[in-house]
Amino acid sequence: MFQLSISFALRAGAGLALIGAGGFALAQIEGGSGAAPIASSGSFEVSSVAVDVVGANAEAARLGGWRLAQRKGWAQLSQRLTGRSTSLSDSALDSLVTGIIVEDEQIGPKRYIAKLGLLFNRARAAQILGVSNTLVRSPPMLIVPVQWSGGVGTTFESATPWQAAWARFRTGNSSVDYVRPAGSGPDALLLNAGQQDRAGRGWWRTILDQYGADDVLFPEVRLYRQWPGGPVIGAFRAGYGPDNRELTRFTLRVDNGDGLPALLDAGVKRMDEAYQAGLRNGTLRPDTLLAAVVPDPNAAAATEELSEGDDLEGLSETPIATAMVFSVQFDTPSAGAVASSEAAVRGVPGVQSAITGSLALGGVSVMRVSYDGSADGLAAALAARGWEVDRNGTTLRIRRPQAAPPAPAEAAQDE
């Protein structure tokens, strides 16, 4: 599966562009000991749109299939968001579609049969349909994908197909806010398979702060190969929380090893549905002990020493400011936006530090902000600096207000 950005005005070499764009997308998610997640929070996705088109030649049939997929995809999206199916002109759809995902295709001399996925610009599509483009999401959840194969459990120690499947999963339609590490830096050391059995809240509190998350999820797969190149069975288990409690488990099978990516993609989709269901029914929620404030033993010892007959005259009461850590989500269309947003947040009075812990260029990144005050105080301080702020517990979502469209010029009057 790969993504192909389309522009009907520039499709003279669509066949070569298809191959080139596929290679570029794969190059984007490779690096380190894992795959970097694809940012998709700015798009609405419609998957598995079937088309069967006949044209004058193979190229005409393919372009006709893409246009038909756009129309059918928009009808499905409007039905899902508004409850009624609507249609738009092909020129309007060309400006709304940001990409086509080729799930499966068969190209003949004059016929094109395919199953495609459509990505629509979230802001513009929501404006046309009259719905909100913001999705109510869970608190940030750190993903630790564990793959067992040949009796060995692997997360980020080396590149695995299971971690790559989570990296290419598009989260734009999911209500779960996944924090997906790329396997670079200390990821392999901090998030190995052995962490599934570590229930210590102090440890997890430290790790989650590093990634700007509120809790941890353990999607696990055990791969069983019948013989080399033969059928592959995947036993999936969705775990959550420091205690790695089980949410669901299921089994999928493919006939040969070439179908392993499709098997894992189906497993990721099933797990996401399970996590969303757990979020809706209240099963999946952050562990309250992870947010508990641990008392400082040094402060207690100092208080005890002062109470043993010391002369307290002349000492004045000085309020002690306690910094709290908050997760701040912000748009990062480019690397420059990361530095400028961090600098802007650091300039807010009361902010001690602002460090990006989860980076997604082209999407929404997460900044770890240490602030002397409450979440309401931080939200008010950011709003005073011109940000649009949405708050969900200790997680804040900030955006720069969009500039108002220019007023239409008045027609010149003849004097």
Image (tube, rainbow, N blue to C red):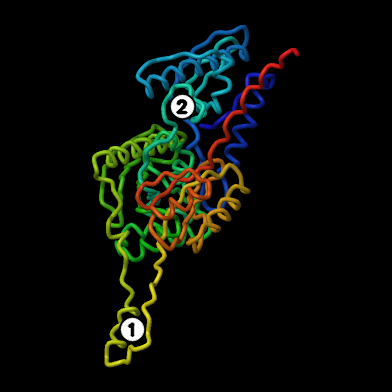
In this rendering, would 70 be left or right of 390?
right
Front one among 338 and 152? 338
In the rendered structure, which amino acid carries the disc numbered 2?
Answer: Ala
Residue 41 in view, yes or no: yes
For label 1, the residue is 302
- Total numbered badges shown on the rendered structure: 2
What residue is drawn where x is 55% and y is 54%?
A: 342
Front one among 121 and 352? 352
> On screen, 67 above or below 243?
above
Mark 1 surroundings: few (<14), some (14-19) or many (≥20) residues within 10 A: few
Q: Position of residue 42 (x, y in %)?
A: 50, 35
Q: Position of residue 267 (x, y in %)?
A: 37, 38
Query: Which image quadrant: the C terminus?
Result: top right
Direction front: furthest residue: 415
Q: Quadrant of residue 173?
A: top left
Label 2 element class: helix
Label 1 element class: helix
Front one among 333 and 40? 333
Q: Position of residue 396 (x, y in %)?
A: 42, 48
Q: Earlier in the sequence, mark 1 or mark 2?
A: 2
In this rendering, would 162 be left or right of 96?
left
For label 2, the residue is 126
In the rendered structure, which amino acid carries the disc numbered 1?
Answer: Ala
What residue is drawn where x is 26% and y is 51%?
A: 245
Direction right: furthest residue: 415
Residue 147 in view, yes or no: no
